[in-house]
C-alpha cells in the first residue's frame, strides 16, 4: 500500500512538473498550438528610430531660403529618435515604439514642409511677378547706394 501511495505521489508530481512546463506556454488557439499568451513578453527587436531622416531634414532646414518651421520639426523629431534606443534598453518597449512613431511623423512632416516650400519657391521663380519685384528692389537699392 505504501508503495502504491509513493507511486501515485510520484505520478502526480511528474504531472505537476509537466503542467508547470506547459504553463510557460499555454495554448491560446487550439488550431495553432505554437502561439501563447507569453509571446508578448519575449524580447522584441528595437523599433526604427528614423535618425537619418531627421538629420537630413535638419540639415535641409538650415538652408537660408527655407523657413524655420522645417528646422524645428526636424529638431524635435531628432530628439524623439534619440529616445528610442534609451527607452528600448531600459525595457520600456511601448515608450520606444511611441518615440519611434513620433520621430517618424515629425520626420515626414518636415519632409512635407520641405517639399511644399520648394514648390512655392519654384512657382515664385517661374512667375514673372517675382522677377519684377526683384528688379524693383535692385533698382531701389542702387538708387539708395
Image: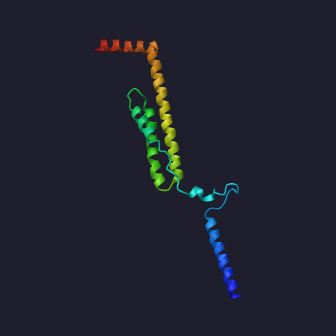
The colouring scheme, among rainbow, by chain, secondary structure or one colour, is rainbow
- Give above or below for 42 relative to 128: below
List x then y, in percent, for residue 113.
48, 30
Q: 8 and 129: which one is in front?
A: 8
Q: Is residue 37 left or right of residue 84?
A: right
Residue 15 position in % (x across, y down): 66, 73
Q: Which one is nearer the viewer's eye here, 66 or 99? A: 99
Q: Residue placed at 46% from the left, 14% from the top?
A: 127
* Image side of residue 136 versus residue 49, left or right: left
Q: Position of residue 22 (x, y in %)?
A: 63, 65
Snapshot quadrant of residue 62: top left
Q: Position of residue 99 (x, y in %)?
A: 50, 46
Furthest-bottom residue in this view = 1
Which residue sits at x=50%, y=56%? 91
Q: Nearer the viewer, residue 120 or 55?
A: 55
Q: Quadrant of the N terminus?
A: bottom right
Amino acid at each position: 500500500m505504501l508503495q502504491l501511495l509513493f507511486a501515485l505521489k510520484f505520478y502526480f508530481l511528474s504531472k505537476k512538473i509537466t503542467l508547470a512546463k506547459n504553463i510557460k506556454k499555454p495554448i491560446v488557439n487550439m488550431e495553432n498550438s505554437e502561439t501563447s499568451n507569453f509571446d508578448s513578453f519575449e524580447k522584441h527587436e528595437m523599433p526604427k528610430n528614423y535618425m537619418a531622416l531627421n538629420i537630413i531634414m535638419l540639415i535641409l532646414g538650415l538652408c537660408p531660403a527655407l523657413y524655420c518651421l522645417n528646422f524645428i520639426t526636424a529638431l524635435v523629431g531628432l530628439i524623439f529618435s534619440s529616445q528610442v534606443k534609451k527607452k528600448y534598453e531600459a525595457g520600456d518597449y511601448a515608450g520606444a515604439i511611441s518615440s519611434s512613431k513620433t520621430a517618424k511623423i515629425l520626420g515626414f512632416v518636415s519632409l512635407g514642409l520641405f517639399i511644399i516650400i520648394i514648390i512655392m519657391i519654384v512657382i515664385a521663380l517661374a512667375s514673372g511677378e517675382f522677377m519684377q519685384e526683384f528688379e524693383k528692389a535692385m533698382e531701389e537699392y542702387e538708387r539708395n547706394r
